[in-house]
Image (cartoon, coloured by chain):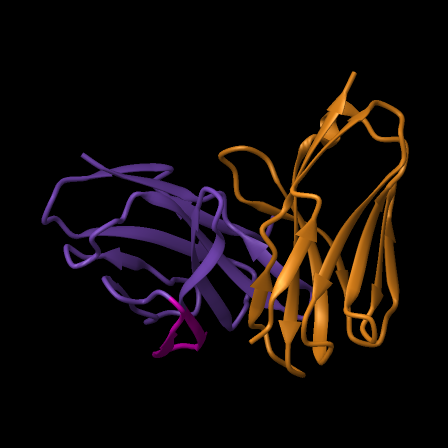
Chain colours: A purple, B orange
Amino acid sequence: DGGITQSPKYLFRKEGQNVTLSCEQNLNHDAMYWYRQDPGQGLRLIYYSQIVNDFQKGDIAEGYSVSREKKESFPLTVTSAQKNPTAFYLCASAGWEGYTFGSGTRLTVV
Amino acid sequence: KQEVTQIPAALSVPEGENLVLNCSFTDSAIYNLQWFRQDPGKGLTSLLLIQSSQREQTSGRLNASLDKSSGRSTLYIAASQPGDSATYLCAVYSGAGSYQLTFGKGTKLSVIP
């Protein structure tokens, strides 16, 4: 079955630490996205990539970084520069049939 | 800048009732529109995609319509069931060939047995 796999499901970050969230898709989609979801704020776009080796900042890119070395993979790193990283992170890919989302990673600062 | 509004923010209905969820957007020059469902703590599940040349889509008990000129879409759920309880999100694609989405904040639906 085609889909998007996000891991881990839960992640805990200490102050000053960088952490990386994984996102893998087998839908053969060129476009991939990272969103952040906070209660009452809806989904906000962090980064997106429309082709391998290219990516663009979204609305809230500060404190985050991404890479797109393979079509199937679009990992997100939450750096120590992100002052309020506790949130639910969703990865998605898009093709002619619309958007497909992963099951999300909940990141908590401890 | 495109803005998407979903009203009401929350809705509670008895089981078996037919209901309509509303979505409005400020810029009518959209491409596609997609409805999603989100269960607590889970990712988004796609329900229906209305492409630019279409005015509605149906899947089982769900029917979504799109009126670009008035900037509105509705999601109709027939014979609601407790399993339909979730948050429903509307998202619009801006620009031909664009996969950039703007989301509404969602309507939280509770279906009471």
Is residue B1 visible in this depiction of the protein? yes
The quadrant of the image that shows the C terminus of chain B is: top right
Residue at 33%, 59% in the rendered image: A75
Residue A30, given in percent of the width and then of the height, sits at: 51, 73
Residue at 73%, 56% in the rendered image: B23
Of A96 and A110, the residue lying toward us? A110
Residue furthest top as drawn: B113
Residue B11, given in percent of the width and then of the height, sits at: 72, 34
Magenta-span inclusion, residue A49:
yes
Of B113 and B57, the residue lying toward us? B113
The mark tally for this picture is 0
Is residue A25 visible in this depiction of the protein? no
Up the image or down, B71 lies above or below B89; here it is below
Residue furthest left as drawn: A16
Magenta stretch, main secondary structure, is: strand
The quadrant of the image that shows the N terminus of chain B is: bottom right
Is residue A53 found left or right of B5 in the rendered image?
A: left
Magenta-span inclusion, residue B53:
no
Is residue B24 found left or right of A107 in the rendered image?
A: right
Up the image or down, B72 lies above or below B17; here it is below
Residue at 86%, 58% in the rendered image: B57
Residue at 56%, 61% in the rendered image: A27
Is residue A11 found left or right of A6 in the rendered image?
A: left
Query: Which residues fall within the magenta stretch?
Result: A48-59
Up the image or down, B23 lies above or below A66; here it is above
Residue A4, given in percent of the width and then of the height, sits at: 50, 52
